[in-house]
Image (cartoon, coloured by chain):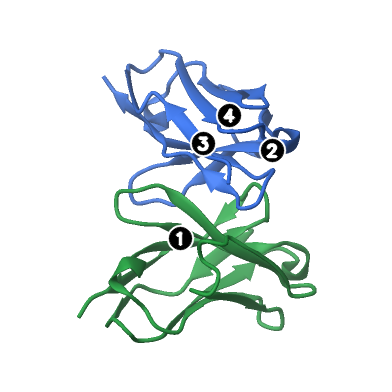
Amino acid sequence: EIVLTQSPGTLSLSPGERATLSCRASQSVSANYLAWYQQKPGQAPRLLIYAASSRAPGIPDRFSGSGSETHFTLTISRLEPEDFAVFYCQQYGNSPFTFGPGTTVEMK
Amino acid sequence: EVQLVQSGAEVIKPGESLTISCKASGYNFDSFWIGWVRQMPGTGLEWMGSVYPGDSDSSSNPSFEGQVTISADKSIRTAYLQWSSLEASDSGMYYCVRGLWAFDVWGQGTMVIVSS
């Protein structure tokens, strides 16, 4: 089973700032099948990025994904007030598909 | 609009059985995998397993094999998650999700509380 580690655990930033979130895998993720999700309190997660760098339909272009093999990054270029949430990475290249523990982006 | 609408919250006693459901609309149900993700209180997300309604093929997380049954009825566009005997450790939020790989559509979640 591939174990995903996310860092930092919490990111304290202000609106307008850039957020950089990291996701590291215990082994190479097949075909870079890595997704990112956003979850706000009381809501289901929402798919942001799939295949490491492809934005899901309707996702603003301030969200971008990059990386390969064992190191992936989600970048939010300029934080909007509605972006503050918990972000999870997920690998779906190897079964069982696994999620990281999450990074909380909180308003400073 | 593509939607997954789940059944309501459940409070169940240990040892009892339970089935929760997820009704799909707005897309060809037969052609997309549908599965379940667990989120326990204050913790992260765990993929439990998925089923392909078109031919009933399935894929599951070994951690959940033998603990739950995942199925789908394509005639009524509904997926199910079933337990035969619940334990307190099964308490949590359960989401149905579309897709076998990246999960592009999520249900609103069903809270299951197992308590005597």
Residue with the mark numbered 1: B108
N-terminal-most mark, 4 or 3:
3
* Amino acid type of the residue that numbered disc 3 sits on in the rendered structure: Leu
Q: Residue B45, position in %: x, y?
A: 45, 50
* Amino acid type of the residue that numbered disc 4 sits on in the rendered structure: Pro
Q: Chain of mark 1?
A: B
Q: Residues within 10 Å of mark 3 (few under 14, many from 20)?
A: many
| Front tag of 1 and 2 | 2
| Front tag of 3 and 1 | 3
| Nearer the observer, B111 or A102 | A102
Q: Residue B20, position in %: x, y?
A: 47, 77
Residue at 68 percent of width and 55 percent of height = B100
Residue A89 is left or right of residue B17, and the answer is right
Q: Which chain is blue?
A: A
Q: Secondary structure at mark 2?
A: loop
N-terminal-most mark, 3 or 2:
3
Q: Which mark is residue A60?
A: 4
Most extreme residue toward the left, as rendered? Answer: B116
